[in-house]
């Protein structure tokens, strides 16, 4: 092995070690230093114990509904996939993302492996994953704007909030513009691919990696496949994406109401605004699944809106247990099921090809 290769390998190990240490430091700092100073643990536990049995059952039902929306959305973006397969791939990849530093990339690689074992080609898998990712990012950028509009209608408009809405709208329009350029023409898609490759190459070279190449052809192919999918299902995918995000918010809102944070303290519009901006925080992968960072953003934001500290902390922790922590053992179970289940296995490229797939090709 050359000295250059050894040096690059050491840099990769160092970066990964630093990533783990930074993530661990953030989580420890928030849960062991911030939270006890924010409110007492006994008060938080008392708020949780005050929830009625009906509240707990309803929260669990909402949690299951929220999970199901991801599976239905996955089926919409991957014609030929069954709902059971969607559950397995979604929960297994999410569990990886929620537990490992840089788990997002590993989760995507796991998704490719699962799809491949079921006979789906890499191109079909890429279209599904990319369309879901793009639509989810559109929703993350659009929901803060929508929430601030609702706040303004309720008389809660301030200069800061309007400025934040303007920035969010600008980000959404920018993202839509890039996507429109890619879909408008093959030549535009290739130009965008080359531009992105140049930006990425500068970063790769700094870390001793080879420059990016072939992005123009990759994005042109993605464009052709995406147009075929969206021509048939853009409305369904858009609606399901919105339902999925709003279902997640509904879990948080009901958790707030269940522990005693009423609308007189935090309105649904204020809760939606805090939730939406906390979701934007997850765009920066500081910790796996935003662990610690999301809790910090939600607790401080909801308390600033008027919620009592112990009750707000209790609601946020219940929300994260149901929507983050529960998915880890569920993902492990679905991963083990995938490894052991041979009935779904197919040769590469032999997955069901509905008419929509043939049209896209």
Image (tube, grey):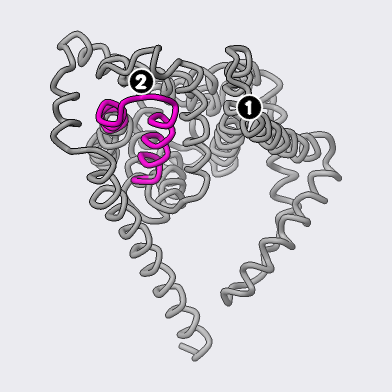
Location of mark 1 (residue) = 158
Identify the residue at horizontal 22%, vertical 12% (top origin).
55
Identify the residue at horizontal 54%, vertical 24% (top origin).
79
Percent x, y of residue 54? 19, 8
| Depth order, front residue of 317/98 | 317
Please give the label number shown on residue 251: 2
Callout 2 touching callout 1 (CB < 8 Å): no
Tell me: 154 left or right of 15: right
Tell me: 323 left or right of 266: left
Percent x, y of residue 42? 13, 34
Please give the label number shown on residue 319: none
Percent x, y of residue 339? 27, 43
Percent x, y of residue 175? 70, 38
Residue 343 in sight from this viewpoint: no
Residue range corresponding to the magenta coloring: 291-319
Secondary structure that dominates the magenta span: helix
Identify the residue at horizontal 30%, vertical 55% (top origin).
29
Q: CA distance from mark 2 to mark 1?
A: 27 Å
């Amino acid at each position: 092995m050359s000295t250059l290769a050894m040096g690059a390998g050491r840099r990769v190990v160092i970066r990964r070690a630093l990533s783990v240490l930074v993530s661990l430091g953030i989580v420890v700092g928030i849960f062991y230093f911030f939270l006890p100073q924010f409110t007492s643990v006994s008060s938080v536990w008392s708020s949780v114990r005050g929830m009625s049995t009906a509240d707990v059952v309803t929260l669990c039902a909402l949690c299951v509904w929220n999970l199901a929306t991801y599976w239905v959305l996955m089926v919409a973006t991957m014609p030929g996939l069954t709902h059971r397969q969607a559950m397995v791939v979604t929960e297994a990849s999410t569990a990886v993302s929620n537990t490992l530093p840089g788990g997002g990339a590993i989760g995507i690689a796991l998704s490719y492996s699962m799809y491949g074992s079921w006979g789906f080609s890499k191109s079909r898998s890429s279209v599904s994953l990319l369309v879901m990712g793009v639509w989810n990012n559109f929703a993350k950028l659009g929901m803060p704007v929508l929430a601030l509009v609702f706040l303004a209608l309720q008389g809660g408009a301030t200069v800061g909030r309007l400025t934040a809405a303007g920035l969010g709208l600008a980000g959404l329009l920018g993202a839509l513009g890039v996507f429109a350029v890619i879909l408008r023409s093959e030549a535009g898609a290739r130009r965008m691919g080359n531009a992105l490759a140049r930006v990425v190459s500068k970063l790769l070279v700094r870390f001793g990696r080879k420059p990016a190449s072939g992005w123009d052809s990759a994005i042109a192919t993605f464009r052709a496949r995406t147009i075929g999918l969206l021509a048939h299902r853009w409305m369904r995918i858009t609606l399901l994406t919105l339902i999925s995000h709003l279902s997640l918010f509904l879990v948080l809102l009901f958790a707030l109401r269940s522990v005693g944070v009423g609308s007189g303290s935090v309105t649904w519009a204020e809760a939606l605004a805090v939730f939406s901006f906390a979701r934007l925080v997850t765009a920066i992968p500081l910790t796996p699944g935003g662990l610690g960072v999301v809790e910090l953003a939600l607790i401080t934001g909801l308390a600033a809106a008027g919620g009592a500290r112990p009750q707000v902390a209790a609601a946020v922790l219940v929300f994260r247990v149901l929507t983050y922590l529960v998915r880890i053992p569920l993902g492990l179970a679905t991963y083990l099921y995938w490894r052991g289940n041979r009935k779904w296995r197919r040769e590469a490229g032999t997955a069901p090809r509905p008419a929509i797939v043939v049209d896209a090709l």
